[in-house]
Amino acid sequence: MSVRLRRSTPSPVVALDTAPAPFLFTGNEFGDPICVLHKDGRLCFVNEAAATLFGGTAGSLQDQSFFDLLPEADRPAAHVAFTSLVSGQPQASFLSGVLKRGRLPVVYDWLLRRDTARGLLVGTARLLPHMMPAELLRAKQEAEGRIRHLFDLIESIADGFFAMDREWRVTYFNATAERLTGKPREEIIGCRFWDVYPMAIGSLAWERYHWVLEHNEPVSFEFFSPHFQRWFETNAYPSSDGLSIFFRDITARKQVEDERRLLSLVAEETVNAVIITDAGGRIVWVNKAFTGLTGYGLDEAAGQKPGDLLQGPETSPKTVEYIRRQVRQQQPFHCELLNYSRSGRAYWTELRGQPIFDTDGKLVQYFSIQTDISERVDLQQMIINQHIDIQKELNEAVLRTQERERTEVGKELHDNVNQVLTAAKLHVESIRYQPEQAAHYAGKGTVLIQQAIDEIRFLSKQLVTPPLQELGLRAGIEELLDQYRQVKHYEIELHWSICEDKLLKEVKLVLYRIIQEQVNNIVKYAQATRLHIALEYDGTHLSLGVSDNGVGFELKGHYHGIGLANIRSRAAAYDGRLSIESSPGKGCSLRILFPKETIALPEYR
């Protein structure tokens, strides 16, 4: 239905002390309530009809809040209309109250307008006396619903929003803007933006906001604020009265972009091959190193699965299954894999893969790095082959040693023990023919048999593995040297400065056998009277030295003898470096250096 505005008879002017001059001659000529408001909602002028409506006088209404004078139920709608007005809208309206005159409901339709020149707001109320209660309630609910929806929308959006008039005064500042800037709206609404943020004068934002006002066209841009130490994405729109600006904090996004840009630069320039696959496992990007290693460019690799492109007949199925299992579980992986290039060349690669997730925890990509380790694998295989050759040589040396020991034992038994036992047998048989000298022959036979027993005991100790675990290495070596001291009366010195508890038990046996081998060589061939044995440790190497004052020898003729070959094989099994110094008449000095990494227990390496 149509509603006509009812005019009342003129009435005397009622003005507050702060009322501006232009309003002294208008307002009371009409019976409708008229108010003039500051931008913070305080009254600065009312006419007589408005004073009567609010139930006060000019003095009592001065500087009071317009909203506090309205019925409580209508204040939200009034706030939304007021906010819409200061945000740039030329006018806004709302319905206020159901005041009773007699029995009929009375409603005022408030219309708010902006006085841009004076920076004030003017509100007029029109009486709607003919609305029936049902129609009135429905119209009021609809109007309030639209207003609340607009207010909720502005206040709930994730973007910061503020509005400025053409004098750069802030007319609206939403809750998100408060949160992003840390400034309450009460401190900025009504103030010039550049007075609040003088550090922004001359900035990119300053230039773009002026451009929008000058060209009356919207603009979007991103900028870094030194004041807030954050990146913002901003959209500025022109309006009839100024600017409406939406902005959001994109610092986290910019950091991710910077990280990805740096990662892309590193990935492009690194010597390692880089593959990026999507969530489905298909290649979306490869770097130059990948092309150089595999022969496949991005145009050929894109859309392919790395396994289909690079794996071949000798690629380990177990390793492939491990990679697939990790990818299914969205986990990182690290392995060594045999791949094949475009030309069919097989190469070994160390492969590391890392899943990349979005902010919601959803897998978006896999980032994989391949390092060509073919040379390292070849070197490892060469070392393995060398160890196999050394082991073969060691086994051969053991066999040769066993044969030599058997030969030596045979010679000792035949040339020494057998002769002693034969002599003992003759003495025992002589008793039959010369019974009167039985005591003499029995005594001689007993001495010879004891000598044979001693020789056999000496040979046994040479052949049986010494109980180093029970005795200890040093005690075992001392016992060995005592045997030689007793039989040949050598002057033997042992210098000891190692901690044998830190040595592998296999190394202890190797050291014992080397000393035994070299001392045997000295006893048999060197004609020496003094031996010096030294075991020392300098923090990185264990040194074994055996020297004598014997006749010496020419290295050229003896360096590859069976005895030294046995020593060399035993030392090589633990990366020992053998050196020998000798010449005729100057004795012999043997020295072996073992690195601690091969001889020490793991906890002491």
Image (cartoon, rainbow, N blue to C red):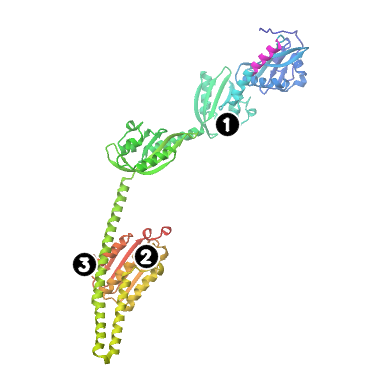
Per the image, the residue denoted by label 2 is 508
Q: Nearer the viewer, residue 404 or 209?
A: 404
Is 363 above or below relative to 602?
above
Q: Main secondary structure of the magenta part?
A: helix
Q: Of the residues tagged 1 and 3, which is closer to the observer?
A: 3
Give residue 451's position: percent from left, percent from top.
30, 80
**Numbered disc 2: secondary structure:** helix
**Numbered disc 1: secondary structure:** helix
* Residue 557 - label: 3
Tell me the residue at 38%/44% (across/down): 335
Asked if residue 193 lies left or right of residue 508, the reply is right
Q: Nearer the viewer, residue 119 or 334?
A: 334
Callout 2: few (<14), some (14-19), or many (20+) C-alpha neighbours within 10 Å? some
Callout 3: few (<14), some (14-19), or many (20+) C-alpha neighbours within 10 Å? few
Type of residue at label 2? Lys
Callout 1: few (<14), some (14-19), or many (20+) C-alpha neighbours within 10 Å? some
Q: Nearer the viewer, residue 428 or 186?
A: 428
The image quarter containing residue 586 is: bottom left
Per the image, the residue denoted by label 1 is 180
Q: Of the residues tagged 1 and 2, which is closer to the observer?
A: 2
**Numbered disc 3: secondary structure:** helix
Label whose residue precedes the other's in the sequence (2 or 3)? 2
Give residue 79's position: percent from left, percent from top.
66, 22
Q: Measure how far apart labels 2 and 3 are at the Cα level.
A: 30 Å
